Each structure stands twice: as C-alpha cells, then as structure tokens.
Image: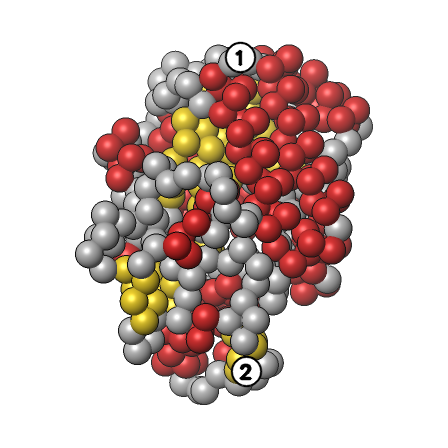
C-alpha cells in the first residue's frame, strides 16, 4: 500500500493533489479543518470542496484536524507509518494582511505546523517524499529593487538578466522586507531544506507566486484571479492597491503545480531541493491587464477603485524562471495561459461544466516500484 498524506486537502492545491494522486493509485489521506473560513469568512469556506472529494474520490479519508495539533498528527502518522510514500504540505495561512493582525497564529501555522509535519515524517516515514508549497515571498521585496520601466499598462523589466525568463533561485532572500507572512513562510522553507540536507529526507520547496484554478475560494485578501473574476461577474467593487495597478504577476494553474509534484515524487532528487515555479511570461499580467481580460470574458465593465497604498512587502514585478525545474524534469511543461485560466474560473463560477483535466491525457508516468493497495481507516 502507498499512502499520500495531503494537508490543506480541501483547498485549491490540496484538492487538485487529492484527485491527481488518487487517480494514480495511491491511497489519499487528507488533513484540513477549513481554517480558510476562519481567516476570510464564509465565502472562503472549503467545506464544499471537502464534500466533493469525499463523494467522488474513491478511498479518500479526511481528518478534520489542525496541523498545529501534534497529538492528532502523531496518531495519523503512527497509524499509516512506512506505508506513507509522500507528504504533500499545502496547508497555510496565506495572507499578508491577515498575518499582520495575528503574527502568533500566522507563525504557528506556517512555521510550527510545517516543523510538526517534518518531524512526523522523520519519525514514522523517513523514506517518504516531502513536498512543500512555499512562496516567492521568501525573497521579500528584493524584486522591487530591479530597474523597472513604467509602460502604459504594466511595469516591465528590460535589458536585465531576469528580463527574458524571469527571476530564478539565485535571488537573495536576505536584507529585504518580507511581511510577517513572508517571514513565517521563509522559516518553513528553510526548515524543509534543512530536513532534506541534515536528515537526508527527500524534501522539496516549490516557491510559487499567484496560484489559481476553478476550485479556489477567492477573497479580497487572497486568490487574485478568482476574486477578480467574482467581482467582474457580481458587480462587487474591486480595490487595486498601489503601483498604479501596473504590478505584474505570473499565474500558475493548480493542475500544472500538482503535475510538478508528481514528477518530483516519481523521481525525487536529494538534498533539500528548491524550485521557483510559476506561469512564466505566457500567464503574466498586471492588475490592469487582468481587469481587461475579465471584462472581455464577462462582457461587462468591472466596478473598481484605486488605493494609493500598496500592500507592505508586495512585489511590483514578478515573473518566474522555471528553467531549473524544467532542466531536472524535462517531461513537465505548462499547459495553461492567462486567458484559459480566467475562462475556466468564469465557467466554474457560472456553474458551467469546464473541461475536466484528465491526468493521463498529458502524462502517464507511473512509478513501478511502489506497492499500491486498499484503503485503511482509522478513528481519531
């Protein structure tokens, strides 16, 4: 039997990982207590996602626990033990603004929760692969020191080593303003690396920017494209924070990220690997440009307002250089661009059937040396 433990399993990335790894024959155990609702309110609840997983994913087992609850984590990991072949850690407090309001809770979730999961992995399944969803906020506001040029609809980088392909892993994480959220995620990122280097566990940190997909419960404080499309469809006012609305993001679909998880799981590289992963130039946009695409898709103008004050530690320009991961895993590639992402989100919010993503349509990579088996249940 091969078991996948997935934290944040009802969220955007977690739910995508549940479906993917279950479709490949693993027994999936999800850990998620719907903290997103506590962070951002009822509209951000992931309970519907959880119900969908429990009714549509064969053999899926869900545990409604907090990743800070070490006793419960201990019982789960002790029960499945060395049958655990992968731990996918996507649970987090994801908002700059929320973190500043409750730094203790933010750090205990992002840093201490990650430490607890690493320790459980080391104790009960040290041969397992540990996959961590990190963030490009580990670089703090260093990208804002780049020689950016103001263009009509965006800030742009020209005549620079990062201009063509984006920012790679060589950028320093030191001497910058991270935000409280960025600091807690940096602590977690370093811990994941250290457990790979010091204890020899197959760990990887994927440093991502804007993650998106039709299953995201977007809110003002988190979920850029999802929340923007919600506002475009409902008429709710959208606020652009600073930088003239010309701040640039690249956007990565949950499917493409989980596909990267799978590639690393099948052929893990040792030594606490770190990869920047994002949508690259093909999915990059400024806020103004994203508004324009939403208006084109919905056929109606967006009701938006502008605030001069940018979010603390926010990036003015970020495009990801994925070439390190592409070099190590040449079978992986991006499958979504900006328009296809927003169109899929629009269809989902309209309760229209968008094309279901079949894992086997693009890649049929199956580990041959793992023993798959039936589900196990465990009362907590």
In-front residue for pair 156/320: 156
Disc 2: CA contacts within 10 A as few (<14), some (14-19) or many (>=20): few
The answer to whether any part of residue 137 appears in the image is no
Q: Quadrant of residue 5?
A: top right
Q: Quadrant of residue 361?
A: top left
Please tell me whether residue 77 is drawn above or below residue 44 in the rendered image. Answer: above
In-front residue for pair 115/226: 115
The local secondary structure at tag 2 comes to strand
Q: CA distance from mark 2 to mark 1?
A: 50 Å
Q: Quadrant of residue 120?
A: top right
User: What residue do we see at 73% from left, 62% from top?
Assistant: 41
Q: Is residue 59 left or right of residue 37?
A: left
On the image, numbered disc 2 is attached to which residue? 305
Q: Which mark is residue 199?
A: 1
Q: What colouring method underlies this structural image?
A: secondary structure
User: What residue do we see at 68% from left, 51% from top?
Assistant: 99
Please tell me whether residue 79 is drawn above or below residue 133 in the rendered image. Answer: above
């Amino acid at each position: 039997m091969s078991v996948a433990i997935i934290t944040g399993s009802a969220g955007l990335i977690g739910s995508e990982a549940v479906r993917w790894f279950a479709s490949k024959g693993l027994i999936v155990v999800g850990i998620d207590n719907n903290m997103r609702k506590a962070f951002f309110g009822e509209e951000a609840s992931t309970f519907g996602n959880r119900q969908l997983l429990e009714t549509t994913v064969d053999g899926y087992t869900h545990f409604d626990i907090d990743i800070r609850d070490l006793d419960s984590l201990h019982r789960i990991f002790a029960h499945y033990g060395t049958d655990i072949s992968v731990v996918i850690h996507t649970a987090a407090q994801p908002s700059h603004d929320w973190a500043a309001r409750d730094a203790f809770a933010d750090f205990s979730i992002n840093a201490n929760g990650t430490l607890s999961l690493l320790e459980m992995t080391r104790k009960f399944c040290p041969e397992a692969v540990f996959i961590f969803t990190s963030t490009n906020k580990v670089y703090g506001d260093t990208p804002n020191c780049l020689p950016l040029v103001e263009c009509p609809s965006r800030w742009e980088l020209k005549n620079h080593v990062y201009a063509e392909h984006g920012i790679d892993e060589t950028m320093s994480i030191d001497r910058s303003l991270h935000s409280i959220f960025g600091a807690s995620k940096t602590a977690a990122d370093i811990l994941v690396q250290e457990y790979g280097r010091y204890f020899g566990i197959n760990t990887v940190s994927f440093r991502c920017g804007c993650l998106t997909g039709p299953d995201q419960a977007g809110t003002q404080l988190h979920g850029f494209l999802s929340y923007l499309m919600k506002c475009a469809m409902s008429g709710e006012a959208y606020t652009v924070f600073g930088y003239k609305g010309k701040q640039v993001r690249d956007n990565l679909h949950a499917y493409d990220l989980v596909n990267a998880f799978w590639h690393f799981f099948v052929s893990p590289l040792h030594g606490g690997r770190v990869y920047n992963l994002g949508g690259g130039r093909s999915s990059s946009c400024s806020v103004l440009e994203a508004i324009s695409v939403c208006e084109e898709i919905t056929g109606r103008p967006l009701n938006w307002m502008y605030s001069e004050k940018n979010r603390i530690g926010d990036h003015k320009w970020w495009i990801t250089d994925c070439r390190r991961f592409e070099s190590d895993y040449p079978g992986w590639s991006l499958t979504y661009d900006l328009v296809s992402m927003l169109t899929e989100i629009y269809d989902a919010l309209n309760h229209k059937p968008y094309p279901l993503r079949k894992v086997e349509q693009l890649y049929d990579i199956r580990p041959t040396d793992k023993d798959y088996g039936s589900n196990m249940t465990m009362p907590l």
